[in-house]
Amino acid sequence: MQPLIIGGGLAGCAAAIDLARAGLRPCLIERNPDPHDKICGEFLSGEAVAALVGLGVAPLALGAVPITRVELWAGRRQAAARLPFPALSLSRRVLDAALVAKAASSVAEFHHGVTALHIGGGRVRTPGGDLRAAAIMLASGKHDVRGQPRPPGPDQIGLKQYFAAPRLHRELAGTVRVVFFDGGYAGLQPVEGGRLNLCLIADGPLYRDLGGWPALLALLLREPGLAALGEGEALLARPLAIARVPYGHLARPAGDGLWRLGDQAAVIPSFCGDGMGIALTSGRLAAELLAAGAGADRFQAELLARTRRPVGLAMAALRLARFPLGRLAALAGLAAIPGALGLLARLTRVADPNALAPAA
Ligand SMILES: Cc1cc2nc3c(=O)[nH]c(=O)nc-3n(C[C@H](O)[C@H](O)[C@H](O)COP(=O)(O)OP(=O)(O)OC[C@H]3O[C@@H](n4cnc5c(N)ncnc54)[C@H](O)[C@@H]3O)c2cc1C
């Protein structure tokens, strides 16, 4: 029986391409008919870039912009470092379209516009009837499928808007800037097409008290690291939004035979810019292990071994950054200790498989 993949995003397409290469003829269902803008800071870290190239998708050829530097800001305080790995920035619309095209040309069946309504008992319910498969891979990203809920995330909202801001765009060439503020954090970086991507997480109560996006943006523009965006022009009719992302979630072997990939397996805080690396790595690992005859529990244990450290470390950094004194002290430390910020960036990447003992 063909493996069945639910979700044609990064993890699902990565698994599909590698399963097809291994001769396993996967079937993939994706609820959206076409790739579209997605909530994402669009920072592609080193291992994400390497995974894409391994899958036959070359981000630079798609117009990706090199990112070599990271800046952290809290008020006027800053720490900056060269990234310890080559990173890129590319819009999800372009990246997802390229991956979907690659997967569609590789797999036996790619059904666009088909939604999984419920998963349970080795069966996937869709509007067209039930699907069965020997191996079902759940790669539905941020969206939970009925029957397979993840724990609810904190009361926070994620928002993304593109800006045309030529002066700031020049200033940020090659740089990702992360700005921590009271009640959240924002990432700002250039993407292809001369645009800047502003992507942020804000506490739900703050967002609601302010009354929505215009007032939140006005608050953000008071941050020294973001003020120059005020000269810019917003490019999307309205920002994209998502609520209650379950940061810190780590799927464990569940004994139910379901392979959980990407955000369904591990959700790292967004400021790390490694969710895409985890998604691609999980898809490739799942394909490799299924082709080798392994089961879902072995896969989940190995993925957990690779994601536990970066997710745990990022969650600890996030807890510290919530307190004004904590983030000022952390930034002072990162600015004063040579190599500290680069090391933090490296340790929050999905772990190098060669550096880990096999999981039990
Ligand atoms: C605010 C924010 C900023 C971020 N910034 C970054 C960043 O800068 N760098 C980074 O690496 N990561 C970032 N991330 C994380 C990153 O976006 C995700 O980790 C990554 O997209 C997960 O990939 P995935 O394949 O699991 O899911 P996705 O890429 O979201 O794909 C899931 C797919 O499943 C489909 N689907 C959903 N439900 C169903 C269903 N029921 N039936 C069929 N199909 C379905 C969806 O349509 C979608 O195409 C950010 C996340 C947030 C919230």
Image (cartoon, grey):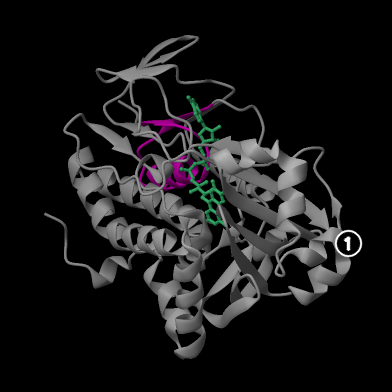
Picture coordinates of residue 150, whole percent (x, y): 35, 33
- Give the quarter of the figure containing the C terminus: bottom left
Q: Is residue 30 above or below residue 279?
A: above
Residue 75 appears left or right of 221: left
Residue 23 appears left or right of 303: right
Mark 1: give few (<14), some (14-19) or many (20+) Cα within 10 Å. Answer: some
Q: Amino acid at mark 1?
A: Glu
Picture coordinates of residue 268, whole percent (x, y): 42, 53
**Which residue appears at 51% of the width and 20% of the height?**
115
- Give the quarter of the figure containing the N terminus: top left
Q: Secondary structure at mark 1?
A: helix
Instruction: Reply yes or no: does residue 288 show up in magenta.
Output: no
**Which residue appears at 60% of the width and 78% of the height?**
78
**Residue 295 visible at all:** no
**Which residue appears at 39% of the width and 17% of the height?**
118
The span shown in magenta is: 4-30
**Which residue appears at 42% of the width and 24% of the height?**
145
Is 213 in front, or is 268? 213
Instruction: Reply yes or no: does residue 27 show up in magenta.
Output: yes
Is 208 in front, or is 354? 208
Picture coordinates of residue 327, whole percent (x, y): 49, 69
Q: Is residue 340 above or below residue 328?
A: below
Residue 161 appears left or right of 128: right
- Identify the residue under disc 1: 231
**Residue 252 visible at all:** yes
